[in-house]
Amino acid sequence: MSVLMKEHGITKTSQPKIALAGKKPPGILPREVRVAIESMKRGAAPGPDNINAGFLRLEATVYMYFS
């Protein structure tokens, strides 16, 4: 990406601001989070946050027992 930007003389990138017209975006339901965690592949490499799927599953289990 940076090579393309240099070739075209672009030095900055920006994201457009999107107006929500006074409405709040929909919230994320706990069930949606649980389904997403359960669908993650076991043993997969962690993402950019360095948190792997096993840790998220463990955290969800611990939360369930102590909440």
Image (spheres, grey):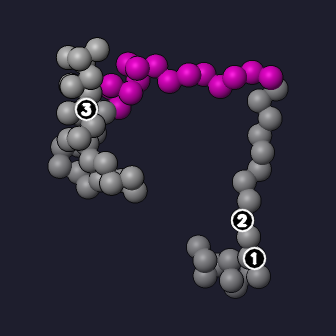
Name the element at disc 3.
helix
Name the element at disc 2.
loop
From the viewer's perspective, tell me whether residue 8 is left or right of residue 3. right
State the residue at coordinates (61%, 82%): 3
Q: CA distance from mark 3 to mark 1?
A: 43 Å
Q: Amino acid at mark 2?
A: Thr
Q: CA distance from mark 1 to mark 2?
A: 8 Å
State the residue at coordinates (17%, 49%): 43
Residue under label 3: 59
From the viewer's perspective, tell me whether residue 11 is left or right of residue 37. right
Does 26 sit above or below residue 1? above
Q: Contact, CB < 8 Å: mark 1 with mark 2?
A: yes
**Magenta extent:** 22-36
Label 1 crowd bin: few (<14), some (14–19), many (20+), radius 10 Å: few
- Figure quadrant of residue 54: top left
Q: CA distance from mark 2 to mark 3?
A: 36 Å
State the residue at coordinates (80%, 35%): 19
Residue under label 1: 10
Location of residue 40 in the rendering, given as x and y in whole percent from the top left corner: 28, 39
Location of residue 16 in the rendering, given as x and y in whole percent from the top left corner: 77, 50
